[in-house]
Image: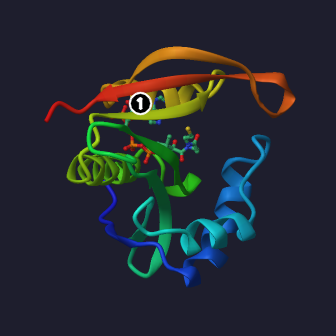
């Protein structure tokens, strides 16, 4: 286990987060630094981004789209952990934080899309109680399918 501290993502994190994103989502395609800027500059009521720090190093990040209304779904927009820190519980900390925030904002369920060929991520989500509910054909670059996963958040 790696000892991490979670805190809100700020604009000065983008110079660390964007290269991690390039490394982790090379073919998806990855979000650009400009997309992170735009996400952080958006309406705070609709978005919630966190980073995980080990010491003063950002080793992971995650983002949530809040439910429009209580009872609506919230969406996991992204979740990522630096390769050297994977499989040490950081992803779990990030996902649990998103789930707590989604509940706090009244979401009835959490939704996300994952590449159908991303076996590690699917194992991760399955372990955390997500179930596949739909296939999105050709959703990702290279005509790769996406799976929509759902976790219900009973109130
Ligand atoms: C998916 C991801 C966020 C998981 O983060 P993590 O910090 O490695 O996850 P954790 O250490 O909390 O893992 C918890 C459990 O998830 C599952 N899991 C995680 N990585 C796995 C892997 N490579 N293979 C199989 N199962 C895996 C395991 O059940 C693991 O428990 P265990 O280590 O006791 O077996 C991380 O692998 C990642 O950043 N991947 C690249 C980006 C990505 O694909 N993001 C998801 C996009 S939808």
Corner quadrant of residue 128: top left
List the residue tagged with mark 1: 125
Q: Where is residue 134 in the image (x, y as percent from the top left)?
A: 54, 15
Q: Residue furthest left?
A: 155
Q: Where is residue 118 in the image (x, y as percent from the top left)?
A: 61, 28
Q: Position of residue 27 (x, y in %)?
A: 79, 41
**Which residue shows up at 58% across the image and 22% down it?**
147
**Which residue shows up at 47% across the image and 56% down it?**
62
**Above-or-below relation of 151 to 49:** above
Q: Ligand 1 within 8 A of label 1's CB?
A: yes
**Above-or-below relation of 130 to 71:** above
**Which residue shows up at 37% across the image and 53% down it?**
94
Q: Residues within 10 Å of mark 1 (few under 14, many from 20)?
A: many
Q: Where is residue 89 in the image (x, y as percent from the top left)?
A: 34, 48
Taking the image as shown, residue 140 lies to the left or right of residue 92, namely right
Query: Colour mode?
Result: rainbow
Taking the image as shown, residue 27 lies to the left or right of residue 62, namely right
**Which residue shows up at 23% across the image and 46% down it?**
106
Taking the image as shown, residue 44 lies to the left or right of residue 154, namely right
Q: Residue furthest front?
A: 69
Check disc 1 and report its element: helix, strand or loop: helix
Corner quadrant of residue 56: bottom left
81 or 14: which is nearer to us? Answer: 14
């Amino acid at each position: 286990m790696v000892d991490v501290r979670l805190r809100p993502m700020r604009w000065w994190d983008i110079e660390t987060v964007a290269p991690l994103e390039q490394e982790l989502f090379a073919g998806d395609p990855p979000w650009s630094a400009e997309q992170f800027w735009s996400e952080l500059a958006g309406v705070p009521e609709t978005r919630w981004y966190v980073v995980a720090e080990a010491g003063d190093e950002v080793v992971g990040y995650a983002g949530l789209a809040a439910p429009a209304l209580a009872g609506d779904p919230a969406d996991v927009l992204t979740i990522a952990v630096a390769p050297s820190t994977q499989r040490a519980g950081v992803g779990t900390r990030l996902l649990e934080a998103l789930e707590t925030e989604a509940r706090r904002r009244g979401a009835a369920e959490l939704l996300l899309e994952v590449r159908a060929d991303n076996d590690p991520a699917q194992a991760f989500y399955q372990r955390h109680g997500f179930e596949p509910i739909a296939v999105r054909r050709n959703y990702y670059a290279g005509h790769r399918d996406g799976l929509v996963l759902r976790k219900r958040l009973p109130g």
